[in-house]
Image (spheres, rainbow, N blue to C red):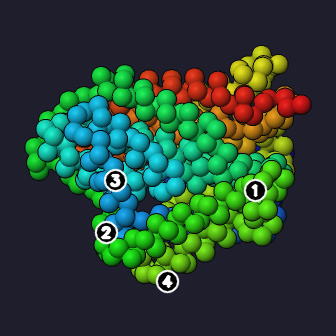
């Protein structure tokens, strides 16, 4: 049996297990890597190489820094202050909640952001006599939108970056996602405030039904809050400087390229917040989403096997053939957006991105086009998991407290997906041309 066929069989099994989640996602990803090694599709020494990948280390560090914001109570304090400034009317409150959630989730865990803001939203809704169902779904949607703005905002962004570097291509910059992420977030918030809110259900809940799920702050020490906030700001600023080109007029001398890396900045920040006791060592370990870590590390060898054996090219040729043999880049981008978006409604958005990003790169290569636009479309569509309560953890978190049913997500969610599609088709080809000169 040809190595490419063996790789496709492994990939098919991994895809089925991702969608059904018969076994945990992390086990599926690592199992796929092990299978590639045992079948001789990649050298055995590369099976667990993903655990040492800089992207995996970067995400681990940012998990810890983000949790320090929650455990010191700083994230909760910021949320309460900003939301209170927006007043108590349904529209202004929705706008404020979504802005706060989007900004926080650009740098912190989407799930953590939703979890810490949810009790605040529930309390304000009760005081303002507004059904929580009118605010909790926008909160979850905003957390998903905000994650599209930075490299560490959501796991699919990191998956895309890893797929690019694994294929020997330059990765995306830390804030490069913001070119499409910011317009998408702004458009998404405006959609929910002016259109989507009319599609939200009005569910009246009794006091005992308002289940508060949150990351409890274990300290409210102002000094620790200052250290946690200052560390996050310093790490983000360092990442900005790392992204600056040495040739940038007037600020090139500030470039940290070659002197500091993104993962080192994140790990140093994580060490600082632990040493300052913003969170305990046990809390730091617990704050790392190990499913994401192993999913990232496990899918890297599978992506490598697809490239080494030519399986990715086989899939690319097949998709191109279905689309007519010589499809335009816009058609490819639209089709991959639709496929990814459909899958991500029912399976992990991280898994969807891990599955399709290498395929998108192969398809772009077969067309002689730059892969950046295609991969970015896959990444953004993987984050457009708005039409079901199982699309993302934030969606699931608000299901019970909001008193929602499965179908309640469909109407506002589909509209938001359409907004994401339009923004992608307009913005992505401008920022990342298909055929750069």
Q: Are marks 4 and 2 in contact (CB under 8 Å)?
A: no
| Image quarter of residue 404 | top left
Q: Which numbered disc, 2 or 3, marks the residue closer to the eye?
A: 3
Residue 79 - label? 3
Q: Pinpoint residue 197: horizontal percent, then vertical percent.
A: 31, 27
Q: Pinpoint residue 375: horizontal percent, then vertical percent.
A: 70, 38
What's the residue at 20%, 30% (across, down)? 202
Residue 146 - label? none
Q: Are marks 1 and 3 in contact (CB under 8 Å)?
A: no
What's the residue at 13%, 38% (across, down)? 129
The one of 249 and 279 positioned closer to us in this rendering = 249
Please state if 251 lies on the left or on the right of 127 as rendered.
right
- What separation in Å lies between label 2 and label 3 (alpha carbons)? 13 Å
Q: Which residue is mark 2?
A: 217
Please state if 100 lies on the left or on the right of 150 as rendered.
left
- What separation in Å lies between label 4 and label 2 (alpha carbons)? 18 Å
What's the residue at 66%, 52% (across, down)? 174
The answer, for residue 139, to whether it is visible in the render is yes
The earlier-in-sequence mark between 4 and 2 is 2
The earlier-in-sequence mark between 2 and 1 is 2
The earlier-in-sequence mark between 1 and 3 is 3
Determine whether 412 is above or below 126 in the image.
above
As helix, strand or loop, the secondary structure at mark 1 comes to loop
The earlier-in-sequence mark between 1 and 4 is 1
Q: Which residue is mark 1?
A: 251
Mark 3 is surrounded, within 10 Å at the Cα level, by few (under 14), some (14 to 19) or many (20 or more) other residues, namely many
| Image quarter of residue 366 | top right
């Amino acid at each position: 049996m040809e190595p490419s066929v063996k790789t496709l069989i492994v990939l098919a099994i991994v895809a089925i297990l991702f969608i059904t989640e018969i076994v945990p996602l992390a086990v599926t990803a690592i199992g796929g890597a092990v299978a590639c090694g045992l079948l001789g599709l990649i050298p055995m020494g590369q099976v667990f190489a993903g655990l040492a990948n800089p992207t995996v280390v970067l995400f681990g560090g940012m998990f810890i820094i983000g949790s320090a914001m929650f455990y010191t109570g700083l994230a909760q304090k910021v949320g309460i202050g900003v939301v209170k400034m927006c007043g108590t009317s349904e529209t202004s409150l929705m706008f404020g909640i979504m802005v706060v959630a989007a900004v926080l989730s650009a740098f912190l865990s989407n799930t953590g952001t939703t979890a810490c803001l949810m009790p605040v939203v529930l309390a304000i809704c009760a005081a303002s006599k507004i059904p929580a169902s009118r605010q909790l779904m926008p909160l979850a949607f905003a957390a998903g939108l905000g994650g599209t703005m930075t490299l560490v905002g959501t796991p699919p962004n990191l998956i895309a970056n890893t797929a690019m570097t694994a294929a020997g291509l330059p990765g995306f910059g830390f804030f490069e996602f913001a070119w499409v992420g910011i317009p998408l977030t702004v458009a998404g918030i405006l959609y929910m405030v002016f259109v989507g809110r009319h599609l939200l259900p009005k569910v009246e809940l009794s006091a005992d039904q308002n289940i508060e799920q949150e990351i409890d702050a274990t300290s409210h020490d102002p000094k620790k809050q200052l250290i946690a906030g200052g560390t996050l700001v310093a790490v983000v600023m360092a990442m900005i400087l790392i992204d600056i080109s040495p040739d940038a007029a007037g600020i090139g001398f500030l470039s940290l390229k070659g002197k500091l890396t993104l993962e080192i900045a994140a790990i140093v920040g994580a060490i600082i917040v632990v040493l300052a006791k913003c969170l305990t060592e046990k809390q730091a370990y617990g704050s790392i989403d190990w499913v994401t870590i192993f999913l990232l590390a496990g899918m890297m060898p599978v992506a490598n096997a697809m490239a080494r054996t030519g399986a990715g090219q086989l899939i690319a040729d097949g998709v191109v053939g279905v689309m007519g043999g010589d499809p335009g880049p816009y058609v490819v981008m639209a089709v991959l957006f639709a496929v990814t978006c459909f899958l991500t409604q029912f399976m992990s958005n991280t898994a969807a991105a891990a599955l399709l990003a290498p395929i998108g790169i192969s398809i772009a290569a077969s067309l002689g086009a730059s892969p950046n636009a295609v991969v970015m479309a896959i990444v953004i569509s993987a984050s457009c998991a708005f039409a079901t309560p199982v699309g993302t953890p934030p969606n699931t978190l608000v299901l019970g407290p909001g008193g929602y049913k499965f179908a309640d997500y469909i109407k506002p969610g589909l509209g938001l997906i359409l907004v994401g599609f339009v923004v992608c088709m307009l913005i992505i080809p401008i920022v990342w041309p298909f055929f750069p000169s």
